[in-house]
Amino acid sequence: GEFPLLPTRELTFHNVSGLSREWEQKRIYLLHRISASQCPGVCGSFEAFLLRTMPPEVMKENSLTLSLGKEYSLSELSSALERLGYSRAATVEGPGQYAIRGGIFDVFPAGSARPVRTEFFGDEPDSMGYFDTQTQRRTENISSFTLLPASEVLTSSLQGSVLAERLRGLTKSSAK
């Protein structure tokens, strides 16, 4: 069989706010597969292999599996997703986004080809499945799914680092 391709960073010098981070999420998914021994080999450029990324143990610590039959607080889930680099949206359209409307939790997991809708009854998932972003209809029922980090650099992993302290100093001085 063919080995998957490890993407490299896409350089952009304009309109950074509208930048797609699809390459990064493909890398995260592939790195997750490698760390879970689900991938016998990888192809990629020298540059792709030199890019700094999170260690496997950090990937594992910052991945979250949701399953039917377990209980979750939607507010804690929302906070966890923010720490993992996901952004809240009115409707989920692409990887790295999530939405909560009443007891309905939609999320497009990083590295996934399809978003997942979970309907809660209280704190317990009542049903979950993949859905189509265009029709908003469920396409396939599932019993669990894993949320990988949506970014290779997590702000929570920067706590106490020199970079975090410098960034904090910059934000304080610019707020004056």
Image (spheres, rainbow, N blue to C red):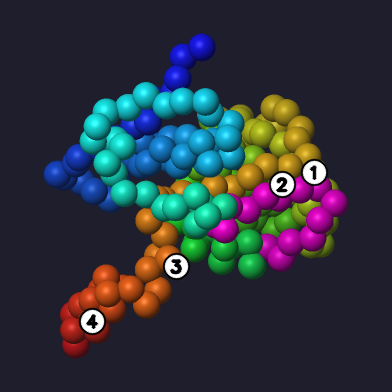
Report the magenta residues as a range.
61-74
Dot placed on the residue nearer the N-terminal end, 2 or 1: 2
Label 2 sits on what residue type? Thr
- Tags 2 and 1 touching, CB below 8 Å: yes
Dot placed on the residue nearer the N-terminal end, 3 or 1: 1
Q: CA distance from mark 3 to mark 2?
A: 26 Å
Label 4 sits on what residue type? Gly
Residue 38's tag is: none
- Tags 3 and 4 touching, CB below 8 Å: no
Q: Nearer the viewer, mark 3 or mark 1?
A: 3
Residue pointed to by mark 4: 169
5 in magenta: no
Q: Residue at x 53, y 55 (%)?
A: 57
Label 1 sits on what residue type? Ser
- Tell me the crowding category of disc 3: few under 14, some 14 to 19, or many 20 or more residues within 10 angstroms, Cα based: few
Label 3 sits on what residue type? Ser
Residue 108 in view of the camera: no
Q: CA distance from mark 4 to mark 1?
A: 45 Å
Q: CA distance from mark 3 to mark 1?
A: 31 Å
Instruction: Give above or below for 139 relative to 155.
Output: above
- Tags 4 and 2 touching, CB below 8 Å: no
Residue pointed to by mark 2: 118
Dot placed on the residue nearer the N-terminal end, 4 or 2: 2
- In the image: residue 9, left or right of residue 144: left
Residue 156's tag is: 3
- In the image: residue 1, left or right of residue 13: right
Element assignment for label 3: helix
- Tell me the crowding category of disc 4: few under 14, some 14 to 19, or many 20 or more residues within 10 angstroms, Cα based: few
Residue pointed to by mark 1: 127
72 in magenta: yes
Where residue 16 sits in the image (x, y, percent)? 24, 48
Q: Residue at x 76, y 33 (%)?
A: 141
